Image (cartoon, coloured by chain):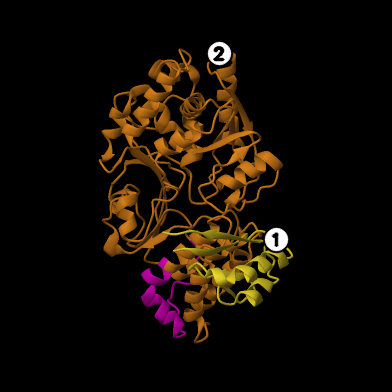
């Protein structure tokens, strides 16, 4: 499936949680505030928000890749 | 503590790991010289690669990945790499690597030499944790023998990382060699090859290397003559728990679990087996006949893991023992990833509460949810192992769980543990 794939570096992540505010469609927080990513790729319409999540993360723990086809 | 139950007729015709001479003279007499010196040509390397592929050898450090594929990947990574001999054996219930290195250090080091020659690595680093001085002195003695006899081509050195459960995880080990930090590294793609300096890091378990050394010398035939065709060869298993004489045995791959456990003098009737180590899987009596081979273990949700079988006697409480293991694994977190740092202690505490008959009405649902949420969310697989162990405990000891959940703990939960821990673990 094509779409955006979000990856969190769990070593870098310190549970700021901004990503879940920006992308509640794909990211929820566990009871300790650490992000859990939905396995399904995210639609291209979320590209702007995903980029912002990458930029806003204070620990630079998020990467977003665009996955084509399959 | 450690003993070998293998009769071991020392013959090059029969593939076996235990029972080889430990000194270089005896090693040379039984196996002949290290035959890599004659040529490190492409055809020699290809021949060994073909031999390994034909042998069907799989990694014995827990991953179970085919050795030939791992080496093919390493060979494509270019020259100048480091062969890392992983003798960390952080698993408290495992002794096989310590035993093998003490009894047959030359076999293990030879395996590393073959890998180094195949992959044109320039350095071999043997990693034995601080504190295991007996093993380290056996290896440094063997290295000295090799140096004074000009036996090996590639430089061999011994290093002493910290003694912690996760210190032998391969990214942790290369990170420590590289930077002195014994911490797992996050790799977005788990298959990303590890690096050390400008070269590849080729991390191999000591048992894998010993098998490889025999296959390189004697061809794939003797190895394949043991085990089952889907998973050939022998393997070392540490058995412990409810028995008079815990120890290491060498068995054919595919031997039924029960036959392996029964090699020891069992102290009492058995209610369950923990297969694959503390991050492994509990197996109930209905599956005791399962062959010890990845392909069969997978059908019951288990893996061969690190070559450990712990026998749980009927006078032990499986939940209590699982709660102790969960606590131990929580304590052994590297402390880097939130889900592991917070999730494992939470799971361990709930399991202990449930065991004591003090769980609230939500404790089981909460455990299931946390197991689901923590799984797969660490940089390494440490939390996944803990999840697997607790999940299987909740399935295999389901009846106990109900009784404990009603506030009626079994009479055995106060018994002292029959498990091995480096230090006392409270419930």
- Among the chains pictured, the one given orange colouring is B
* Residue B57: image location, x then y, percent: 37, 37
| Circle 1 chain | A
User: What colour do you see for chain A?
Assistant: yellow
Q: Quadrant of residue B392?
A: bottom left
Judge whether residue B220 is colored magenta.
no
Question: Cβ–Cβ below 8 Å for labels 1 and 2?
Answer: no
**Picture layout, residue B260 above or below residue B22:** below
- Quadrant in which the C terminus of chain B is drawn: bottom right
Q: Which residue lies most toward the front here?
A: A45
Q: Element type at marker 1?
A: loop
| Circle 2 chain | B
Q: Which residue is mark 2?
A: B149
Which callout, 1 or 2, points to the residue nearer the camera?
1
Q: CA distance from mark 1 to mark 2?
A: 53 Å
Q: Element type at marker 2?
A: loop
> Can residue B168 be seen here?
no
> Can residue B244 be seen here?
yes
Judge whether residue B410 is colored magenta.
yes
Q: Which residue is mark 1?
A: A60
Q: Is residue A37 left or right of residue B49?
A: right
Q: Which residues are magenta?
A: B392-417
* Residue B305: image location, x then y, percent: 43, 51
């Amino acid at each position: 499936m094509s779409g955006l794939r979000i990856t969190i570096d769990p070593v870098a992540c310190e549970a700021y949680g901004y990503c879940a505010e920006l992308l509640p469609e794909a990211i929820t927080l566990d009871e300790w505030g650490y992000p859990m990513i939905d396995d399904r790729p995210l639609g291209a319409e979320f590209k702007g928000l995903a980029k912002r999540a990458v930029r806003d993360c204070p620990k630079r723990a998020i990467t977003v890749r665009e996955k084509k086809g399959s | 503590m450690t003993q070998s139950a293998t009769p071991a007729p020392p013959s090059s015709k029969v593939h076996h790991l235990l029972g080889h001479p430990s000194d270089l003279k005896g090693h040379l007499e039984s196996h002949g010289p290290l035959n890599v010196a004659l040529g490190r040509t492409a055809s020699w390397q290809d021949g060994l690669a073909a031999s390994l592929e034909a042998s069907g050898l799989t990694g014995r450090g827990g991953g179970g990945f085919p050795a030939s594929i791992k080496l093919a990947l390493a060979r494509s990574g270019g020259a100048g790499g480091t062969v890392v001999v992983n003798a960390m054996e952080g698993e408290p219930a495992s002794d096989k690597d310590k035993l093998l290195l003490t009894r047959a250090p030359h076999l293990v080091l030879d395996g590393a030499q073959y890998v180094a020659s195949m992959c044109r690595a320039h350095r071999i680093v043997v990693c034995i944790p601080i504190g295991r001085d007996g093993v380290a002195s056996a290896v440094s003695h063997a290295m000295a023998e090799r140096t004074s006899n000009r036996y090996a081509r590639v430089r061999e050195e011994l290093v002493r990382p910290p003694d912690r459960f996760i210190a032998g995880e391969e990214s942790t080990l290369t990170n420590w060699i590289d930077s002195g930090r014994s911490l797992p590294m996050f790799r977005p793609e788990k298959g990303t090859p590890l690096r050390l300096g400008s070269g590849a890091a080729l991390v191999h378990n000591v048992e894998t290397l010993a098998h490889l050394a025999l296959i390189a010398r004697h061809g794939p035939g003797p190895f394949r003559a043991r085990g089952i065709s889907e998973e050939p060869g022998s393997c070392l298993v540490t058995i412990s728990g409810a028995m008079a004489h815990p120890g290491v045995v060498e068995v054919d791959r595919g031997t039924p679990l029960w036959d392996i456990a029964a090699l020891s003098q069992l102290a009492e009737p058995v209610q369950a087996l923990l297969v694959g180590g503390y991050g492994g899987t509990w197996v109930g009596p209905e599956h005791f006949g399962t062959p010890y081979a990845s392909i069969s273990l997978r059908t019951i949700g288990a893996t061969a893991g690190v070559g450990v079988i712990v026998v749980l006697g009927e006078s032990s409480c499986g939940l209590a023992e699982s709660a102790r293991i969960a606590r131990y694994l929580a304590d052994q977190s590297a402390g880097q990833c939130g889900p592991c740092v917070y999730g494992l202690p939470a799971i361990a505490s709930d399991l202990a509460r449930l065991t004591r008959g003090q769980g609230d009405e939500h404790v089981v649902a909460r455990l299931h949810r946390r197991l689901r949420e923590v799984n797969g969310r660490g940089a390494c697989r440490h939390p996944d192992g803990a999840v697997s162990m607790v999940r299987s405990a909740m399935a295999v000891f389901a009846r106990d769980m109900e009784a404990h959940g009603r506030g009626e703990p079994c009479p055995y939960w106060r018994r002292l543990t029959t498990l091995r821990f480096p230090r006392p673990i409270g419930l």
